Amino acid sequence: MSASNPATLPIHPPHKAFSPARILAIGANTLLELVRLKVFYFLLIFGLVLIGSSIFMINFSFQEQFQMLKDISLGAMSIFTWLLAVLATAMLLPKDIEDRTLYTILAKPVPRFEYLIGKLLGVLALVLISTLVMAGLFAVVLYARQEIVIAESLAQAGREATPEQVQEIVRGIKASTFTWSLVPAIIAVYLKAALCASLTLLISTFASSWIFTIVTSVAVYFIGNIQSIARDYWLAENGGTALTKVFLALVSLLFPDLQLFNLVDDIVAGNAIATGIFLKTAGLGCVYVVVYLFLAYFVFAKKEL
Amino acid sequence: MSTPAISIRNLTKVFPIPFKRERVTAVHDLSLTVEPGQVYGLLGPNGSGKSTTMKIVLGLVPASAGTTEIFGRDSSLVESREEVGFLPENPYFYKYLTGEETLRFFGKLCGLSGPKLRDRARDLLKLVGLENAADRRIGGYSKGMLQRIGLAQALIQEPRLLVLDEPTAGVDPAGSREIKDLILEFKSRGITILLCSHLLGQVQEICDRVGILHKGRLVREGKLHDLISVENQTQLILENASPELLARIEAEINCSGARLLEKAKPQTTLERYFLEVTQS
């Protein structure tokens, strides 16, 4: 160890008010923590759900099979990514406070906003990896089912089928499996989970325990999912008075309308998702993530540790 | 005159009690200065305000009134922590990281990277005697090893000030001695140390200056030697003195008007005896 001689230059570079390297260090460490906690094991459950569901649908027509497979897979992806985002985020801050690792980190030249951004980035990276793995598993199962259906259909058509008829059969089946609209649906699933992670981080900055954080986050999730239905019902019953509109605007501000991120129904129904609607949804998701992160910093900056 | 390592002026911290109108004053109008290179012992019973003072110095808790500075910089500013290393009481680091990964993580937070960080981490592991446990996960470390890796992370950016909260709490005598020796080593390198400890014997061995907090107020402060010396008494320790010599000295004392208060054989400390027995 070199001595702390004031005449020699310090080994650390001058402090920067904002350092992506520090954020990256905290983010990478958070991801490593979650990976070493073996949270990826839940992907096995997702795989089993996919394989199990594909086995039980062999008695349906191929269009129905693909619809059901997409419905189940995207629905499961949505639930699994949400669960992962909420559970992983809820424990981060309370655990660091309880173990006093937060003291050791913040006693270094680390601004509190960098700590929060790093923690959130770690969770978002974990959710991204999980989403990609689930999407990959989904693609493999869908491809396998497609090949089985093609083989069965060609066998049914028999040897009398002309090459044109064979091509038509194959084209018809392929058109029902992989469609470009799956991509925005998967991105929307990820953005919804990211939004929920950011919201959970905000709750954990003032919550007294991680159980409270999880319960509140789950409650907000359900309110967020039913609020559009409740809003339509409320407006139909009470009319559009100014007071009602203000109340509904407040609810919308506090609780995100998570139904906006549910593009699965359109995909399953075979509808294409308009680029404008997708971009609006994606932008809204990003805005919510940033707003919740900002609010989390606002609370955390004043927190007495 | 050099800039003080720590300067606390008229510091007061009041905590509101949730759902009540009452308030608790944890620290009341505290002023003290720690000079560079000094080992300062902040003493006091539980609830005396030691930890709160330390947290304010580290910028973890805002002060209600007064100012705290580290090497002339307001300690509530993040950049003031470039010069500080902190070891909390009973530290828990990320259990899934190895010793070396832990040091690298904290080094990155201080802006270190590349070969400089790698070399620094290895040097510190060697310094605290953990080079053989560098690749073991922290979850498997003993209490003493945890304290030592804690000291290493506190030193990672080569700070000029170390803040140590009960650095030997829960550590066995041998481990405690090792940590104490490390602190003395840091002192010899010119690092300023603010030490909070209940182990007064250890504080006495290490510290140059102490402050005693009681109910949030600084009740005594000064050089350790000045505070605990009994001014009107003198201690002589003789080796191989014959009974005749001792008799002559006693007679001389009686003739002089001074009073012999105690005549006894010096004893070794229990700590030293324990270490001799267990390390032989």
Image (tube, coloured by chain):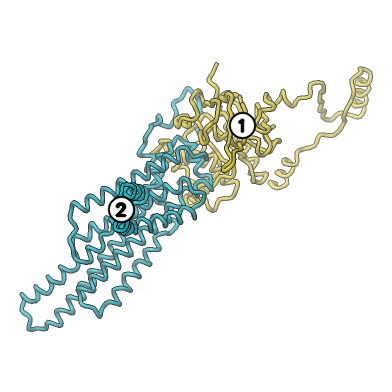
Instruction: Indicate whether B273 appears above or below B206.
Output: below
Q: Position of residue A107 (x, y in %)?
A: 50, 37
The tint chain B carries is: yellow
Q: Residue at x 21, y 66 (%)?
A: A269
Q: Which mark is residue B126?
A: none
Q: Residue at x 86, y 28 (%)?
A: B241
The chain whose colour is cyan is A
Packing grade of label 1 (10 A; few <14, some 14-19, many >=20) is many
Judging depth in this view, the residue of A260 and B83 nearest the camera is: A260
Question: In the figure, is residue A132 to the left or right of B108?
Answer: left
Q: Chain of mark 1?
A: B
Mark 1 = which residue?
A: B27
- For the question of whether residue A35 can be seen, the reply is no
| Quadrant where the N terminus of chain B is found in the figure | top right
Instruction: Indicate whether B259 appears above or below A53.
Output: above
Q: Chain of mark 2?
A: A
Judging depth in this view, the residue of A151 and A74 nearest the camera is: A74
Q: Residue at x 60, y 34 (%)?
A: B183
Q: Amino acid at mark 2?
A: Leu
Q: Position of residue B172 (x, y in %)?
A: 66, 46
Quarter-of-image position of residue B5: top right
Q: Which mark is residue A191?
A: 2
Q: Position of residue A233 (x, y in %)?
A: 31, 59
Quote the CA–CA distance across marks 2 and 1: 47 Å
- For the question of whether residue A282 can be seen, the reply is yes
Q: Amino acid at mark 1?
A: Val
